[in-house]
Amino acid sequence: MRSMHVMHVIDSMHGGGAETSLLEVAPALTSRGVRTSIVTLLADDGALEDRVDALGLTHIRLKHRDPLGLTVGLRNLICSQRPDLLHTTLLFANLAGRIAARTTGTPVVTTLANQDYGPEHRANSCYGGWSVRAVHAADMLTVPLTMRFHAISVDVATVMSHRLRIPNDRIRVIYRGRDPARLGTPTLDRRLRTRAALSIDAKTPVVLSVGRLDRQKGIDTTIDAFRLLVKQIPDALLLVAGRPANASAMVQAKTRGYPAIRLLGHRTDVPDLMCAADVLSFPSRWEGLGGTLVEAMALRLAIVASDIPPLAETIGDVGWPLVRPDDGRGLAEQLVSLLERGAANETRKDAGERRFRALFTAEAASHGMAEFYQDVLRDARRRR
């Protein structure tokens, strides 16, 4: 496989799923001859900067704030860096990246990272439903500028193919991966050390929620469920790890006066938190894949998730319970069930770990992405 330079254009390097997945796969891509550089368009909180530096990746932040300035700045950067391929992820990067690359003749691929532009987005947008429709139209107008699309799940490919009118043969599904070495091993010593650092007793039942405080993630449903759960398990504790977002005020209001619910903010030690917890609550209203579930399976953490197609696809036949979105009572019942089962959950944990090793490692993701890039470049050469 010949070496190539892929320039990733992404909105920002906040510590979200798209950003984390990019950094997870980059080292394995390097070993396959794919050099990764990153360009961001918006300001971020620097949550991943240390990881970017540790990996030795080039990270360029464009200074412009207006759409035209971003597009022109990106075009100039493409001309100076001359990447073989531009890979865009998330809204602003998709729009600016596609236009800039077209003016330089650089092939473009785009990641479909979520089920965007649905009724749930129009209902939850702080700018109103009209803004979602406007963005949807802009995305559709620039779709022809992308040669091929990478979808992070079969369900995302199916839904977005319809919503953006992309022919199926232009989309390839490649699951996102996680590096087992970075996640580490869920040992008893690691569990106890993490609990001690958080001043949590070794026997305390711990429910974990991971995700930004966004309506999408259903943190409010987890809190509602936990309020019901403590009526049956009074000594239980809920840890909520995630940076602020559009549901922060609601989460703060719901947790006021509940010392058993701890808001931890953004954390860089989520794998440690997973080792310390007993069950993960993940009742998202919509998702693209569920990278948090991938990490939970790798670290043998019990899971209750919402019954939506991408999360069901991620968990597969492992057997962790799924509940309807917004069903706090159903979520509480399943969380209590898993907490009370204890050692009886080991069979599902074994199955989840096997599923992770088979489908969701960084090595598997890098293999798929490297082949995808090579195919796109071959197509581009034929078109020329």
Image: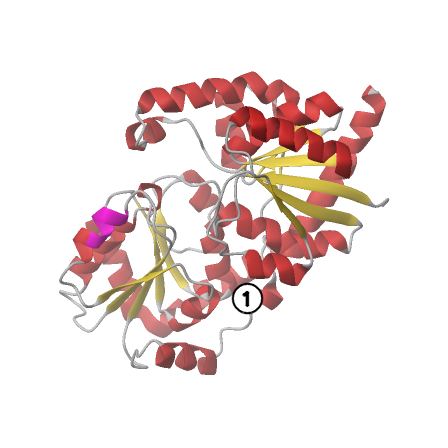
What residue appears at the point 37 percent right and 53 percent down from the top-left corner? 243
Q: Is residue 363 above or below residue 372?
A: below
Left or right: residue 228 versus residue 301 is left
Visible residue check, residue 342: yes
- Residue 229: image x %, image y %? 19, 62
Residue 149 visible here: no
Number of labelled discs?
A: 1
- Tell me if residue 177 comes above or below residue 257 in the rendering: above
On the image, which quarter does residue 341 sit in?
bottom left
Residue drawn at x 52%, y 43% is: 12
Residue at 30 percent across and 78 percent down: it is 200
Q: Is residue 88 magenta?
A: no
What residue span does the magenta drawing correspond to? Answer: 248-252
Residue marked by disc 1: 183
- Which quadrant does the N terminus fall into? top right
Query: Which residue is rendered at x = 52% and y = 31% of the image?
Result: 92
